[in-house]
Amino acid sequence: MARTPSRRAGRQERMAARAAQGALAAPYTIRKTGLFSLINDEAVAIIERNADRILDEIGMDFRGDPETLELFRKHGARVDGERVRFDPGWCRDKIKTAPRVFTQHARNPARSVQIGGDAQVYAPSFGPPFVHDMEKGRRYATLEDFKNITKLHHQLGAVNHSGGVVVEPVDVPVELRHLHMAHTHLTLNDKPFMGAVTAPERARDTVEMCRIAMGREFVDNNCVLYSVVNTNAPLVMDETMLWALKEYAQAGQCTVVSPFVLGGAMSPVSVAATLAQVLAEVMASVALTQLIRPGAPAAFGTFFSPISLKTGAPTFGTPEGTQFQMCAKTLADRLGLPFHSVGGLTAAKVPDAQAGYESQAQLMGAALAGVNFIIHATGCLEGLLTTGYEKIVMDADRCSAMQRFIGGVDFSEAAQAMDAFFEVEPGGHFLGAQHTQDNYQTAFWMGDMSDNGTYEQWAAEGAEWQHERASARVKQLLNDYEHPAMDDSIRAALDDFVARRTKEIKGGHT
């Protein structure tokens, strides 16, 4: 069916207007709704008691670093080889120095985000080696993809964070990827971002690049990086993650301890047992950050996905995943730590109905639970093996809706609209009322990706399915992208740092 140019232009104008509003969106959302928890005081006491017993009687392994073991021993933990055991209450006491709320500063101060309290931050997916779009299909990601996705997130107002490994740029050698990823986050986006955790020298390089971009003194006295360290469940912190934790804690940057748990394989098959295990791993690891540098920012993280006990494959958008979040948030609050957890996860391979309902279920659960930092909020396909271009903009729409939802209902005098009742006669309509005219652009949430017109209008505009509209949206955003402001001397210094470190790494120097 031929498309009507005038109607098509009208849709593009509406989308452009909403995009302009999105670019000016708040850097994060303050939740004005209550928390939805599934754990009562009796259950909390059970889980905390079981976590204490795990740490006291079984303990947790901290591998590959005698210095860490000695630090634990010095402060009264019981060390046997690489196994560390803790008296009940020991970890909680050490965690008290971690801040309940802190700011992660962006290169652009207007983009800085609050972590903790009533704030919610929505961030991209992390770690997929593949990308997918409707024209080229699924393929290995490249540095160009990494840059394109960073450009998209820069422009999407509902995405508060530039993220970390938004995809793995497989065309860049592993030992050099962190340099190019940090350079991209710092130059193509001015929102806050996440640090590299795959080797201590990569963490140090990331901190140093932030010092170049934001000033050494500022970085040394403020949190500018938010980095996720995964325990190797059950009850192991391996050498790689341990060294990353140490580097960021020493630098005063945020370390998120997020046990990566596939329920049934890496934890028992019940939510209650997994909660106790995760709480134990988080308490022991966050306590370590406070031994290294008291007051260093930290967060309680979770990634819990049940496996299919028929196939062994991870599942997403399940009731158990949401139940877990709604219990774990309460445990984090009792520790006085910000809570980090997952958003729009799906096992779908393409941006279809399965992708929509699974991602929405998980994202809604995170919003209701009051997750402070929602990772994997945009782009997830194939259980985080793939980031989808179209999925990013579709998910950003859902993030925008969730932000409107948790922002609560406006009961101000203006919202009560009493003048409108006296203006409109009984049996009349409010479309022409002054209150409607004053508020029509912002009164109701309007997404970019949903089509709410008539069938005839939809057909006249090309009869596009949502993934087709999303594909056009991606192209529009990439075409309209403009670099955020950066001083030429800072850009040159970052370029020089990447070039120098590339030469040193290739020469075998860390």
Image: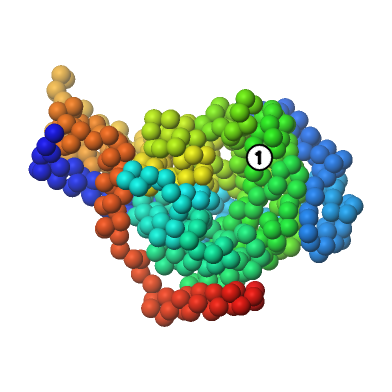
**Quarter holding the N terminus?**
top left
**Position above or below: 119 against 174:** above
- Which residue in the protein does label 1 denote? 261
Q: Is residue 307 left or right of residue 498?
A: right
Percent x, y of residue 298: 64, 54
Q: Nearer the viewer, residue 165 or 364?
A: 165
Q: Is residue 287 left or right of residue 165?
A: right
In the image, what residue occupies the spot 14% across and 28% down?
A: 456
Q: Is residue 136 left or right of residue 56?
A: left
Percent x, y of residue 489: 41, 80
In the image, what residue occupies the spot 30% across and 63% down?
A: 482
In the image, what residue occupies the spot 44% across and 61% down?
A: 143
Percent x, y of residue 19: 28, 50
**Position above or below: 190 against 314:** below
How crowded is the residue under tag 1: few (<14 C-alpha within 10 Å), some, or many (20+)? Answer: many
In the image, what residue occupies the spot 32% across and 38% down?
A: 467
Q: Nearer the viewer, residue 423 or 155?
A: 155
Percent x, y of residue 319: 56, 27
Label 1: element kind: strand
Residue type at numbered disc 1? Val
**Position above or below: 407 against 194:** above
